[in-house]
Amino acid sequence: MAENRVIDTKRVFSGRVINLDVDTVSLANGVEINLEIIRHPGASAVVPLIMDPDPKVILLRQFRHAAGDTIWEIPAGVLEKGEKPEDCAVRELAEESGARAGKIEHLSTILTTPGFTNEVIHLFLATEIEMGVASPEDDEQLETEVRTWGEVMEMIENGTIRDAKTISALLLTKNRLRL
Amino acid sequence: MAENRVIDTKRVFSGRVINLDVDTVSLANGVEINLEIIRHPGASAVVPLIMDPDPKVILLRQFRHAAGDTIWEIPAGVLEKGEKPEDCAVRELAEESGARAGKIEHLSTILTTPGFTNEVIHLFLATEIEMGVASPEDDEQLETEVRTWGEVMEMIENGTIRDAKTISALLLTKNRLRL
């Protein structure tokens, strides 16, 4: 499919994590429009899977101002400058949950909402977990909770888990491991 | 978990689909920070499942300027003012793919990326599909493609499908129907 031709781009806002640009674009069909784009540095997220011997997952209860609610998530965070996605996943797992992973594998890299942002989240599965003490940042409001695999699947089915990266990563894990 | 106290909110930008606010917030732990929030009207997305008799899915190939690429998605679109999520799903399905659904059911309502936006996408499963002619809007660049269920699962596993709402909705469908 033909690409767009960008005629002009304006940086409208520079924030802590995101920047907002307005691009004036000529579409392949000749239509000319302004498109709002949130530029984001990208992030990693990780499913911490404990085999005990039955599978369990470390989840976070995190207050998210944008969602206006405390929601269920897997550990995740924004990539630091030059940081590899896998290193970010390992770091965020340790900071947010205290856990260390003996093994980490890539599940997929998702576009969170490609209608208005270039944000990608690299999804990982962490196994051979050693529990430890979390060290969240000052502006993070979170608690860890361990749930069985059956409970987690029920939380997805009944709408308790609503975060897209968390649903995607958990169901990709289910497929990968045939859980 | 305690909620944040919003001390101030500023509308920084009003766009075609999204608005950007900066909220000054006092967290429950006493920390005061500025948070960037993209306010979004919400959207619906729908898995059009054809039983022929083996399951097939109508997918879209859509150029997304923000992602800088042509990506695979299920039909989706932004809620119009006062529009019910289910009605939006039916409308977008017809506009983008030409298909009409005899039956539509709710799968889940996801938060696309709750770190910086309040956007929710209501996910639906459409069955008893009748094919028709698409009528996309001027600024939409898309083509429909029908894929077997096996092909769709392979496209998720190998990273060809990267859109979070699409992965979530397809894997929720797999769970729901035990496909």
Image: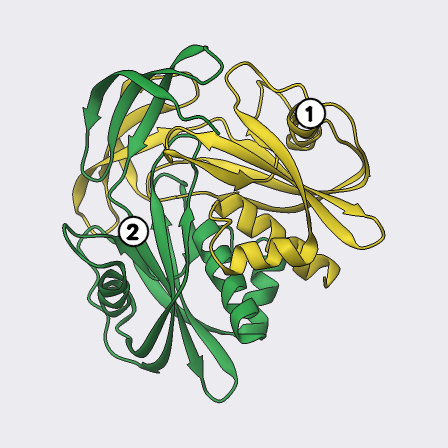
Chain colours: A green, B yellow
Residue, x 26% and y 58% (percent of image)? A85
Indicate left or right for B74 with B37 as reference: right
Of residue A178 and residue B29, the one placed in the foreground of this image is: A178
Q: How many numbered marks are there?
A: 2
Residue B116: name its quadrant: top left
Mark 1 is surrounded, within 10 Å at the Cα level, by few (under 14), some (14 to 19) or many (20 or more) other residues, namely many
| Alpha-carbon span between mark 1 and mark 2 | 33 Å
Indicate left or right for B13 with A27 as reference: left
Residue at which label 1 appears: B91
**Residue B140 shows in this picture:** yes
Of residue A2 and residue B35, the one placed in the foreground of this image is: A2
The image position of residue A34, as x and y in percent, is 36, 14
Residue that lies at the very extreme toward the left in this rendered image: A81
Residue, x 39% and y 61% (percent of image)? A74
Of residue B131 and residue A85, the one placed in the foreground of this image is: B131
- Considering the image in quadrants, where does the C terminus of chain A appear? bottom right
User: Which amino acid is tagged 2?
Assistant: Ala
Residue at which label 2 appears: A43
Chain letter of the residue carrying label 1: B
User: Which amino acid is tagged 1?
Assistant: Arg
The image position of residue A41, as x and y in percent, is 24, 43
Secondary structure of the residue carrying tag 2 is strand
